[in-house]
Image (spheres, helix red, strand yellow):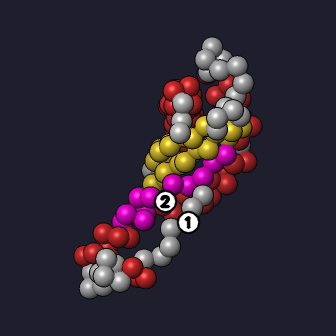
Amino acid sequence: METNRQKKIAGILQEDLADVLQRAASSGGLKGVIISVTKVNVTSDLSIAKVYLSVFPNKEAKPLLEGVKSNTPLIRHELAQRTRHQLRRMPQLDFFIDDSLEYIDGIERSLKGDENPIENPDLLGKRKKS
């Protein structure tokens, strides 16, 4: 169960991260790519933040995630500058791809097709937990 402090910090990080990543993408020459921060989970000791990114188009997700992971120290420094009046220490950032939209789209396509995943659940691939 998340405390109010964890929720507040997660909200601040989510908002600032979205701004930092969108600016980096536009200045880095990534035109037509939308990056959104769908969720941020902060541990109870506020030392680690799990950041879930949604990228459109989906084919750009893997290379973009690798680029974000390689630039994590720069992103963390930028966030620390933005949140210096709210946080004493910047949590370590762990980035993951949020595949929930892709999963939902697969369910919708299956329901519209001939094979119904409700009647035969083996048709859908297992969802990976991260």
Q: Sequence-wise, which precedes: disc 2 or disc 1?
A: 2
Asked whether, in this view, residue 80 is left or right of residue 106, the answer is: right
Q: Quadrant of residue 78?
A: top right
Is the Cβ of the residue at disc 2 closer than 8 Å to that at disc 1? yes
Q: Which residue is drawn at 56% across and 25% down?
A: 5
The C terminus - image quarter? bottom right
Of 121 and 49, nearer the camera is: 121
Q: Which residue is drawn at 68% across and 39% down?
A: 48
Question: Relative to 80, is 99 above or below?
Answer: below
Q: Which residue is drawn at 57% across and 41% down?
A: 41
- Residue positioned most to the top: 85
Q: Which disc, if any, is residue 99?
A: 2
Which range is magenta?
94-105
- Residue positioned most to the front: 1
Q: Quadrant of residue 56?
A: bottom left
Would you say residue 103 sits in the magenta stretch? yes
Q: Which disc, if any, is residue 128?
A: 1
| x then y, percent, for residue 73 | 74, 37
Q: Is residue 2 at least partly visible in the picture?
A: yes
Amino acid type for the residue under numbered disc 2: Asp
Q: Could you say whether the residue bearing mark 2 is in a helix, strand or loop? A: loop
Would you say residue 56 sits in the magenta stretch? no
Q: Could you say whether the residue bearing mark 1 is in a helix, strand or loop? A: loop
Q: Which disc, if any, is residue 102?
A: none
Question: Relative to 98, is 82 above or below?
Answer: above
